[in-house]
Amino acid sequence: MAFLELTNINKLFVQGHYAVDNFNLNVESGEFISFLGPSGCGKTTTLRMIAGFETPSSGSIKINRVEITNKPPNQRQIGMVFQSYALFPNMTIAGNIGFGLMLAGKKNDEIKKRLGEMLDLIHLPNYGDRYPYQLSGGQQQRVALARAIAIQPQLLLLDEPLSALDAKIRVELRSEIRRIQRELGITTIYVTHDQEEALSLSDRIVVMNSGKIEQVGTPFEIYNYPTTAFTASFVGQLNLMPITVADAASGTSTFNGIRLNTSQPTSLANGTSAKLALRPEEMNFGKVDGKNLLDGKVESITFLGSIVRTRVDIGGSMISVDLFNERKITLPQVGEQVTVNFPAHACWILE
Amino acid sequence: MTQTDSTGTPPAPSKTSSSLWAWLGLVPFFLFAIAFLFLPSLSIFINSFQDNNGSFTFKNIIDLSEPFIINAYWNSISISVITAIGGGIFGFFLAYAVTLGGMPKFARPFLTTFSGVASNFAGVPLAFAFISTLGRTGMVTVLFRDVFGINIYQAGFNLYSFWGLSLVYLYFQFPLMVLIMTPALDGLRREWREAAENLGANSFQYWRYVAMPIILPSLLGSMILLFGNSFGAYATAYSLTGGGAINLVTIVIGAQISGDVLNNQGLGYALALGMVVIMSLSLIGYSWLQRRTERWIR
Amino acid sequence: MKRGSIWAWLWFILGLIYFFLPLYATFDFSLRLKRGVLSFAAYENVFSDERFINGFTFSLQMSFWTIVVCLLLIVPTAYWVHLRLPRVRPVVELITLMPFVIPAVVLTFGLIQVYAKAYTFFGTSLPSVLSLDLFTLPGLINLRDAVAARAPITLAFPIVLIAAYTVLSFPYMYRAVDTGLRAMDVRTLTEAAQSLGADTPKILWYVIFPNLRAALLSGAFLTIAIVVGEFTFASLLVWPALGPYIQLIGANRAYEPAALSVISFAITWATLGLLQFFTPEQQGQIAGAR
C-alpha cells in the first residue's frame, strides 16, 4: 500500500478536452517524484488537484489510506512551493515561516524554536526580521520552502519552483532542495519541464504528454529504456533512422541495405518500416569489429563545452555523434568521409 | 551627406546642448503652470495675510474662528469624511464583488464603464436627477407615499439638507472607489490565497492576516482621494441648495467671489488658504500610502 | 473562489439599483411636462431654446480649445520628461496633481485676483502691467456682453476660462499620454529609429504620434466630457456655458431640468462610449466636475 495513491484521476475542461486523462500513480513514503513534460501536458493541473486547488472530474486521491479528494485545501496538511514564491509581502520572513504554525495554534516558544531550525536548514540565520522585498529570488524561494516545511506536512508539492531563477542559482538551489528533502524524508512531488532537474533530483520520473502518462520509471530507466516515442525524444537527444525490420525475433533491421543488430526482439512484423533509436553519446568514430558500422560524411562540428557534437550525413539521414571533450581530442574534418560505430545493445526499434 | 553620426543626435561633447533643447521644450508647460497655477495660489497666500490697507496681518486667519466659518468647515469636513467612508466601503465591496466575488465575466467591464460615466455625472445634472428621485415630488417620494403610505419628508428626511447632500455625493464617490480599487484588487495575487490555504488558513484568516494588510494602504489612500473629491465639490451642492440651505466652505467662497458677502476681503482669502492646507495634507497622506502600496505589490 | 457568492450578488444588485434609480426617475420625470400624458414636450422646449443651443456650442468650442492647448502643453513635456529629463518627472507630476490640491472655487478666486481689472495684485493687475488685453478670442460667440450686463462682476476672459479648463484636464491628459508613452517603451523605439537613420522630427512623426493616437484620443474625449459638464469655472467667471444654463433653468422651471439632466447624461455616456470604442483596453475613466 502506497503513501500517496492517485487512482483514475481525470480532469475535464470544456468541450470534451481532458487536461488530465486516466492518471494512476502510487508513491511510497519518502519518495521524490517528478512530473516531467512540455507546457500544457497536465502536470501542474495534477499537482493542483493533489493540493486541493482543483477538483478531479473523477477518480480518487488518498494519502496514508485517507481519502482526501474532496477535502478543502486548508485541511490537507500539504506543503506547497509556488513558482512565484508567493511570500506574503506584509510579513517578515519570520512571520511567513511561522504563519502555518500560528494558525495551528502553536505556542510562541514552539514557533520560535521551529523558526530557528528552519532558518538554519535553509542557511539563512538572522534573516527573520527582513521583508520579502529585501531578499533575492533565490533567497525568497528558500524561505518559501521553509514555510512549506515548517508545518511538517505529510506531502510536499513544488510547482516549477526554479523556473524564475538564474541558471547558476537554479543548480545550487536544486541540490539544496534535494538535500533537505532527504534529510527530512518528506514525500515530494516536483513539477518541471526541465529534464536535467528531473533526472538529477528524482527517485522516479512521471513523463506526461497531453494529459496522459507516457512512462513512469527511474531516471536511468526513462533515459535509457524509454517505452514510448515521445519519452525517447523528449528526454535527452535522440537519433532516429528509418529502417525496415529484417528479423523480428532477433531484432535485426536494415538501413539502406546495411544490416544493423539491436539484440532486442521486436513485436513488429518482418518488412515493416520503423525507426531505429540511438543516443548520440553511444556512438564513436572508427571501424571496430563486433559493432554496427555506418559510413557517412561530416556535415558540422559544434563545440558545446564538455561535449563535442558532430553531425554526420549517413546516406540521406542526419545523425549526431557526441564525444566527451578532451584537450587533445582528434576530430574529423567537415566534409570528411567517416565510419561511425555503435554497439548493438545501444539501439532499439521504435514504431 | 558626410559620413558622420547618422542618428540625428549630436555626439557626446554636445550633450549639454541637447539637454538645453529638452529644457526649452519644457518651458511652455512651466510658464503655463506659473501663470495659471502658481501665481493665483501665491496671490491667495499673500492676500490672506494682508488687511484692507495692504499691510501684513494675522487677523484674517484669526477671523476664521468666527462661528459661521467654523460651521462651514465643520460641515465640509463632515460630509467629506462621511461620504469618503460610506462611498469607500460601498465601492470597495462592489469592486470586490466583480474581481474576486466570482461574478460572471461581463460584470466587471459593465461596472467599470458605468462607474466611469457615473463619476463624471456629478454637478448640476446630478442634483436635478436626485430632485426627480427624492425631491418633494420625486418618484421615490411619491412611491413611498402612494404605495407604502409613508411621507418621508414628514418622517424627517429632507433632500435639501446635510444628509440629503451626502446621499447625492455618494453617487460619484463610490464609482470613483470602484475605479481605483478594481485594479488594486487585481494586485492580490491568487498564489497568496493558495499559499495561505495550504498552510491551513480559512477565508477569514486569509483576509485578516494576508489580504487586508496588503490592501489596506490602497484602501485608505483611495478614501483620502474620496475625501478630497468631496471637500472641493461645489457644483452639486450649489445646484441642490441654491447656495443657501447648507453652509459649506466652497459655497461660501463661491458667494464671496460673486459679491463681498463676508464684508471682509481678507477673510475670503484665509478661507481659500484653509482649503488648500487641508487638501495638501490629504495629498501628502495619499502619497505616503501610495509609496507603501507600491513597495509590496509590484 | 469560483462560485458567485450571495454577498457579491447582493452588493452588485444594490449598486445597480443605486445607479439606475435616479436615472430612471429623472427620465420619467422629464416626460411629464404635459399633465397626465407622457411626452417629450420638455425636450422640445429645451432643444428649441436658443440659450441651450448657444450654451452647448459655447461649451463645445471651449472643449476644442482646451484640447488644443492641453495637447500642445502636455505631449512635448511628457515626451521630454520620459526621454531626456526623468529627474523632472516628480515636479511635472506634482503640477498635474494641482487640481486636486486647489479645488475649482479656490483657483477661480486666485485667477480673478491675478487677471481681473477690477482687483489688484501687488498694486496693479498683471495684464495691465504687461499691457496685455485678455479679451475674447476672435471667432467665439459673443454673448459675454449680454450676460455681463446682469452680472455684478464683469470678467470676460475666455483665455482664463480655457486656461482653467486646461488645468482641470491636466491630470487626465498627462496620465493618458504618460501611460501611452510607457506602453510603447519610448526609449527603445527611439533608439531603434535612430539606428535606422531617423532624426527627432521624423521620430516624433512616424513613431511617437501614431503610437500615441489612442492615448490622445482618450484624453481628448475625457476633456470633452469634463468641459461640457463643467459648472464652477463657467459660473463664477460668468461665461454662458452649458453648466450655468442648466442651473439657471433648474432654478426657474420644473420639468426642463430633468430633461437637461437626461441629455447631459446622454452626452457623457456618448463621449465616454466613443472613448471605449477607440481605446478598448482602458476600463473606466475618472473625470468631471463636482
Image (cartoon, grey):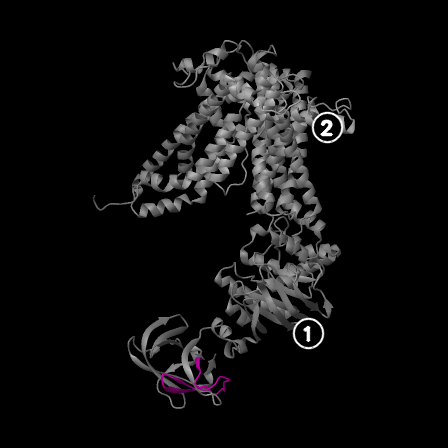
Residue, disc 2: B143
Instruction: In this rendered view, identify the residue nearer to me: C202 or B278.
Output: C202
The disc label shown at residue B125, or none:
none
In the rendered image, residue A267 lying in the magenta stretch gets the answer yes
Q: Residues within 10 Å of mark 1 (few under 14, many from 20)?
A: some
- Disc 2 on helix, strand or loop? helix
Residues rendered magenta in the picture: A253-275
> Circle 2 marks a residue in which chain?
B
Above or below, A60 against B39 in this view is below
Q: Quadrant of residue C200?
A: top left
Total numbered badges shown on the rendered structure: 2
Query: Are tags 2 and 1 found on a single chain?
Result: no
Q: Position of residue A300 (x, y in %)?
A: 33, 72
Residue pushed farthest front?
C37
Above or below, B1 against A24 in this view is above
- Disc 1 on helix, strand or loop? loop
Q: Position of residue B135 (x, y in %)?
A: 68, 23
Q: Position of residue C84 (x, y in %)?
A: 39, 39
Q: Residues within 10 Å of mark 2 (few under 14, many from 20)?
A: some
Residue, disc 1: A2
> Circle 1 marks a residue in which chain?
A
Name the kind of residue labelled 2 in the image: Leu
Q: Spatial distance from mark 2 to mark 1, Cα to Cα?
A: 70 Å
Instruction: In this rendered view, identify the residue nearer to me: A328 or A148.
Output: A148
Q: Quadrant of residue B134?
A: top right
Relative to B277, is A100 on the left or the right? right
